[in-house]
Image (tube, rainbow, N blue to C red):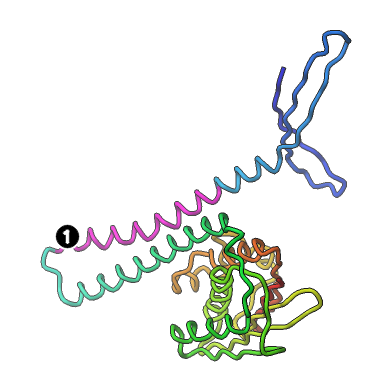
Amino acid sequence: MQTSEIACCNWDNGEKKTSHFHLTATPRSRYNGAILVIQDKTSDYKMVEIGKDFIANASHELRTPITVIRGFAETLQEHPEPSIHMLEEIGGKIVRTTRRLEKLIRSLLTLADIENVLPENFQRVDLVGLVNQCKQQFLHCQPNVSLQLEFCRPHLFVRVDPLLFELAIMNLLENAAKYSIQPAQITLALYQEKGYVSLRVQDEGIGIPEEDLPHIFERFYTVDKARSRKAGGAGLGLAIVKTIVEKHKGKIDVLSEVGKGSVFTIFV
């Protein structure tokens, strides 16, 4: 006989937590008893719930720009002979919205790809060279940003997936610029610690409220929703960074104070 039940457990700290168990009972014919196997399935249920939340959030984020584009298309339908000004205004808004939609889809696909990263993609990479490459790409897109580099030595070699790690660095730089008063002042530093290398991205931006810090690496979470929407973000950049770092068996920390900026540090 098999049964599955949901049990509510009260832990020592008084927190009420729902746990999921799968129970299997096998009667023993020669004895008055049975073999009872209890399996904790809480993590499995949690992954299912995370997947459901992700799909719901992704659907919402995709629906918003699609609704906007449809609204503009209907406006053009209602005005068979729109003025040049109307065409320019609506055309510009459609282009910006489709770019945001494209960025969102690209981020969603990136998250899926990261989950399936192959071991053979990891290589011995000079982080100094990779960071210099990221600086060139970043300043090409945002030439008004001041980006200072600090290295403890000419070369720092680590074993990483170069494409994924480059993406993590670029996302941190873009996040620093997005939440800074322009022109943004950003510092990227590399340090050789005992047993690991740390990569630090520091900005002098608006900072992160203390109550938001525990959630900033969650998918679709944004601290300043208005600023994020304006920049075309959907709250996936830092989630991608954390996922990449975890795939490299590393960790990421953040220190921030409102009005004084933020410091993100990757340890690998």
Does 73 appear in magenta? Answer: yes
Side of 169 relative to 97 (left or right): right
Side of 242 relative to 60 (left or right): right
The one nearer the camera, 52 or 41, is: 41
Q: Residue furthest left?
A: 81
Circle 1 sits in a helix, a strand or a loop, which is it? helix
Residue 155 percent coordinates (x, y): 67, 85
The one nearer the camera, 55 or 165, is: 165
Q: What stretch is highlighted in magenta?
A: 53-79
Residue at image location 22% in from the left, 76% down from the top: 88
Side of 39 relative to 111 (left or right): right
Does 68 appear in magenta? Answer: yes
Q: Which residue lies furthest to the top in this view?
A: 30
Crowd band around label 1 with a 10 angstrom C-alpha radius: few (<14), some (14–19), many (20+)? few
Residue 158 to residue 67: above or below:
below
Kindly report the secondary structure that dominates the magenta region of the rendered protein.
helix
Quadrant in the picture for residue 95? bottom left
Residue at image location 66% in from the left, 41% down from the top: 44
What amino acid type should be assigned to the residue bearing mark 1? Glu
Instruction: Quickly name the residue at label 1.
Output: 78
Residue at image location 69% in from the left, 75% down from the top: 265
Side of 96 relative to 87 (left or right): right
The one nearer the camera, 152 or 174, is: 152
Residue 22 percent coordinates (x, y): 72, 30
Residue 111 to residue 56: above or below:
below
